[in-house]
Image (cartoon, grey):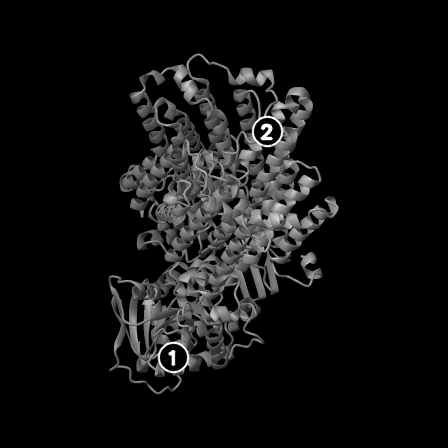
Amino acid sequence: MTLSALLPTRKPWFWSFAAAFAAWGMLVLFLQGRGADEAVTASLAFAAFFVIVGLGQMMVITLGPGNIDLSIPATITLAAVVAMRVMGGEDANIPLGVLAALGCGVAVGLFNNVLIHLLRMPPIIATLSASFLIQSAAISYGRGLQVRPPQALQDFATARLYGVPVNAVCAVLLAAVVGVVLARTVYGRSVLAVGQNPRAAWLAGVRVGLVRSATYVLCAVFAALCGVLLAGFSGGASLDMGQEYLLASIAVVVIGGCSVAGGRANVPGIWGASLFLFLLVSMLNSMGLGAGFRLVLTGLIIIAVITLAGGEPAQR
Amino acid sequence: MTSRTVITLSGVAKSFGAVKALTGVDLALQSGECLGLVGHNGAGKSTLMNVLAGTLAPDGGRLMIDGTLLDRSYSVFRAHALGVRCVFQELSLCGNLTVAENTRVFHPHLRGFGWKKRSAALIGAMLDDIFPGHGIAPGTPVSELSIAQRQMVEIARAFTVTDTPLRFVILDEPTSSLDASRAGQLLSFVRRQVAAGIGVILISHMLHEILETADRVVIMRDGRVVAVDAASAYDREGLVVAMGGLAHHQAQAREARAANGAEIRVRAERGSAFTARAGEIVGLGGLAAHGQTDLLLSVFRAAQRRTAGVSVSGTVAMVAGDRQRDGVFPLWSIKQNIGVRSLKAARRGLLIDPDRENRLAEEWRTRIGIRAPDLDLGILSLSGGNQQKALFARALGSDAQIILMDDPMRGVDVQTKREVYRLIRDEADRGRTFLWYTTEMEELYECDRVYVFRNGAISADLGQGQLTEERILQASF
Amino acid sequence: MTANALPSRNALFSRNALLSRNALRAALPAVTLLLLLGTIFWIQPRAMTPFGINLMLNLAVPIVLATMAQLFVMTVNDLDLSIGGFVGLSACIGATWLNQTPLLGVAALAACILAYAGLGALIHLRRLPSIVVTLGMSFVWLGLAVILLPTPGGAAPGWLKSLMAFKPPYLPFPILASIVIALLVHVGLMRTSYGAILRGFGGNPQAMRRSGWSSLRATMTMYALAGLFGVLSGLALLGISTSADANIALRYTLLSIAGAILGGCEFTGGRVSPVGAVLGALTLALAGSALTFLRISPDWQVGAQGAILIAVLALRAFVVRKED
């Protein structure tokens, strides 16, 4: 509170970028200047995956309290496995594979909707039980799968455009699109309205159920997209490839300055938080601190951010 | 049993923002007496009771119990320790706990081995005493009880005694969910308690209950006590007249607008037929929460999808009364709050055109007079009255032909009201239909036709010429 | 459920339908478990031996304990996303400090429980969303466990191993332990007078405060209890698997939520059922290991848990909807 008064900017995304910059600075300091630019490109490449799933999770969390998608990791894995199967290592099959993966995303999103709306399950339980099923489907379908991604996909996922990783470019474009959707389309405004006050949104003519459904589908599609790119980037699908993205997707939303009480999304903040998470890892690695310290620090930062942001207003 | 004064209120005042809920109340409450408290909507009854129960601190005035002056530290706990209990209108039971467990919550010393049995016996005996044949098992979770049964438990719990004495009980609309025979049981129990020396304040809109049960009647209006007298001094008519205050109800001369020929936009059935035509301002009167909001919501729903019993032709928009719950988007700017109902109309292609959004907001800022330096400021930077104007702008700026108003002028200053009344009349002249639920008498005079509601049904249908405050009160109570 | 006072005949008669629906709802966790057991025994009669049951319910005790921890937090309308990491940390402390320098181990575990109570205080005082705070803590617990035990290893104290290998005469140990845990929590939370107060805070916090009860104290109590049962879960898990790993229990976070929900608990309103939650946890534990008995591919182990969860909640939604 006092901190935000001191600095000129009170924009919620400022802090995530400031933190990312600080982590980068520390990293450069420890590397004594060597590899400062490589650290930037590497962090862009890796952060891109956080950004893609983080945007989807952000849309869901923006829908308001209780809304969260726990099926992201399973969806990433399933989409990657399906894409690799369909592509079969052939460049010609890439479009088909991508379509199949996105189709998986749509199917997962619709399935989540069935559980939430038809069976009236709380979203957290609905997406949790869906993720159990999806995970098993991915394991079963992907057993013995050792297909490498098609060369063209690998080249694309690891390519650089003027030194900037292509997947980072994709993630920036995606973020820009999401930003425009939120600010300038009826759907985006509806998401923000529902997140602030679903009853008022309904009384203002917003079709609340439809907006919620569409958002869960959108989130699953983003996860599927991340799965395909990740498979191309890391040379194939593996069954635990989605694991770290559950907590990470929520963490970037929180650190990025979105409101966990809903109604406030923050697209640049997702980027800042994703860069920060990756740079933090690099910085701690370069300091010779292990994974344990990195995890502890990540956790403490999440708690510090949410504590400083002040939580929900008093409900009286 | 001789009565003696237990609680003395002098000059108690309380305001919420610009609204003065209590403007200097003087009252003496006696043991062994049932005091009936009546008044129309917003007279200040509930606020006064909250002050007495310790849930609201008054802004001014003095509160004395047993001759000791109570300062700011007066609270629910002090009240409880002094033997003052209150049954609030909104129920304060925990739904996940059983009846016996809820009784335990009320009595900190009810613990140790066998507490459940003792608690069940305590509440069971009290329920038997007040409502013989109640059929409530103390082991039942409250969420499984009907609303009437919950109210019975809540009342009975307030009369249970363990370690602190019981001296004074406030019953705020205790019979609102009870049928006539249960209400009768409660009122005869109240008489028995009074005979035993306990003081009771009874608030009820069922005037016959007051007249039959109370020893004295206090009539409140506009945050003041306007009359105190023995209950025998009044009959039903007398109470209604005293509540209305005949002084200020000359109907403003308004040219009756002929809406009779126009197309019927809303048809519904609430005991008798309800209709609203194009260009008509239809008022929904009566006491608060007697089915008016319910009608508005079913009209709103019927406009979206086919609903049995309500037919609506035309687009609708709602002006919320409870801004926090139903209206305002707190994270958004004034402009966004105005524009949210008209997003589709503001599009150019796929995207919302910022110019159109600006124009809409600017146009209504001038027309309705929203006092804000910049429409990009957050909606919460506005005063309550100006927030309400923004909500009016949202509805009036939309393409809606039917505007539903859910008592939107609560807590709005006089100046704003005047401006909005004029605007509503202009818009009605252009063919819009207004369904206007209001708890304020003067607003009903702005309407072309008024339906008075009682217990969810229409109890009177008054055309412009037939409108008098007395008629409305008669139909309300 | 347990009508400790007999309702008058009149009441029973008029609310017969409602009572039976509630009974049905309360019986759902038990019915699910019995159905699952029945299916297993029908297909694979050899499983119906103490040895078979022991094998199938091998990991049940730690899951049951973790589910109880989750239940405490759920009672006050919060959710704990860190319990899995916390159970893992407890196991790691058990496999290192508790084994080598018992005093340090006990102190560390006690500190963990205190940390949980402090977490409850932080969440309550600053009105923070529990999901986010516990999400952050899940990183912290996991990180601490990794620092303590960077690679899988360590050793369980001997007494712990023999405790978990205990073979009571009539009942398989996991079942006996589950019954004891269920009774303990049921009595503590559902039958004591302070238990009623604790649950009241889940039902109507404002009314509780109005009656003079401290919500801070209630929240801290519930979080401390969650910490205690998390520690017990970690030690039980360690006793069974004899060595520890920081990642050993990460799945417990989701399993414990699923188990509690399966047992009829709800996210809001303080509606919890310790007995139901134990049954729910047993069902999930069984669903995990039973597939091998049913000769279904282990690929579908998690999937079976998801399917059971969906089936039961669908059934419950059906029951509840009829009530409306």
Determine contact: label 2, label 1, CB under 8 Å: no
Q: Say whether residue B221 is visible.
A: no
Q: Is residue B209 above or below residue A105?
A: below
| Subunit that carries the residue with mark 2 | C
Helix, strand or loop at label 1? It is loop
A107 vs A5, nearest the viewer: A107
Residue C90 tag number: 2
Q: Please, which chain is the residue tagged with disc 1 on? A: B
The residue labelled by disc 1 is B445
Residue B197 pos. (x, y %): 48, 51
Query: In which quadrant is the C terminus of chain B drawn?
Result: bottom left
- Where residue B267 is drawn, which disc sits there? none
Residue B72 lies left or right of residue B245; in this view the side is right
Residue C53 found in image quarter: top left
Q: Position of residue C122 (x, y in %)?
A: 62, 45
Q: Residue placed farthest to the top in the image?
A: C169
